């Protein structure tokens, strides 16, 4: 699926009119084009499935670990942003931590951050973002044992509606051994 920037321009112009403003005034005349380019960038992940993202960032290194080991690879506090699909509102101050138990190969560390960025560049729910990242990491590493925790502020909570500026949302996604091993979960804190 390709992002249709022409339609975005057209609809942003319509939104400006619906708001009671003049889209042809000097301060707004280029706004539809700027928004279309911004949306193409910030929603880039919508162009790809989880499997395609896994293929894009499939840089792994062969590494043998003892069978059944609990050797843990974790990258914490990966900064990201996304947009809530309910209000098209910004999810900001997003910190994502990803962990997995390797199964014969390890993923290049920068690829973990790139996977987080690409999965976040979609209209998302924070809960689904964790599931998407876990699925992609599992596809790339071949490990079913993946954990993803996310902390984020949502402008749909902080800037509108209830307007609770200090509110943060925390989600955790556990796959494989992380789902039932409390000691393994405790290592993530």
Image (cartoon, rainbow, N blue to C red):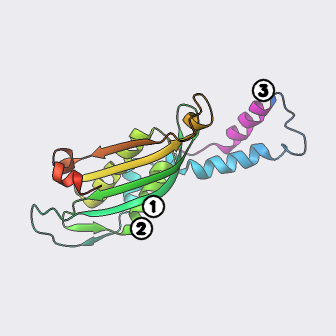
How far is disc 3 from disc 2 in space, using C-alphas?
43 Å
Q: Give the CA separation, mark 2 to mark 1.
A: 6 Å
Q: Secondary structure at mark 3?
A: helix
Residue that label 2 marks: 110
Residue 160 found in image quarter: top right
Locate residue 38, reporting x and y percent.
Answer: 66, 50
Q: Please give the name of the residue rendered at 53% of the width and 31% of the height, measured from the top-left corner.
A: 86
Q: Which residue is mark 3?
A: 18
The kind of secondary structure element at disc 2 is: helix
x and y percent of residue 51 in the render? Answer: 36, 51
Is residue 159 shown left or right of residue 25?
A: left
Answer with mark 1 or mark 3, whichever residue precedes in sequence: 3
Q: Are marks 1 and 3 in contact (CB under 8 Å)?
A: no
Q: Tell me: 63 left or right of 48.
A: left
Residue 75 is one of the magenta-drawn residues: no
Front residue of 169 and 112: 169
Structural distance between the alpha carbons of marks 1 and 3: 37 Å
Image point (49%, 57%), residue name = 79
Q: Residues within 10 Å of mark 3 (few under 14, many from 20)?
A: few
Which stretch did the figure color magenta?
1-16
Q: Could you tell me residue 114's position as x and y percent?
A: 45, 61
**Disc ID at residue 114:** 1
Q: In which quadrant of the rendered view does residue 173 lie?
A: top left
Q: Which residue extends farthest right?
A: 25
Secondary structure mostly seen in magenta is helix
């Amino acid at each position: 699926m390709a992002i249709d920037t022409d339609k975005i321009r057209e609809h942003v112009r319509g939104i400006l009119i619906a708001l009671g403003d003049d889209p042809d005034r000097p301060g707004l005349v280029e706004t539809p084009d700027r928004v279309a380019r911004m949306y193409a960038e910030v929603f880039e992940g919508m162009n790809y499935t989880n499997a395609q993202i896994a293929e894009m960032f499939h840089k792994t290194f062969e590494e043998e670990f003892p069978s059944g080991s609990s050797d843990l690879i974790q990258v914490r506090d990966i900064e990201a942003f996304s947009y809530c699909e309910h209000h098209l509102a910004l999810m900001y101050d997003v910190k994502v931590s990803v962990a997995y138990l390797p199964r014969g190969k390890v993923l290049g560390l920068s690829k973990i951050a790139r996977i987080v960025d690409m999965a976040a560049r979609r209209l998302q729910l924070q809960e689904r973002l964790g599931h998407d990242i876990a699925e992609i990491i599992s596809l790339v590493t071949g490990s079913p044992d993946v954990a993803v925790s996310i902390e984020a502020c949502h402008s749909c909570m902080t800037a509108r509606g209830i307007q609770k500026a200090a509110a943060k949302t925390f989600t955790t996604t556990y796959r494989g051994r992380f789902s039932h091993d409390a000691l393994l979960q405790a290592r993530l804190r």
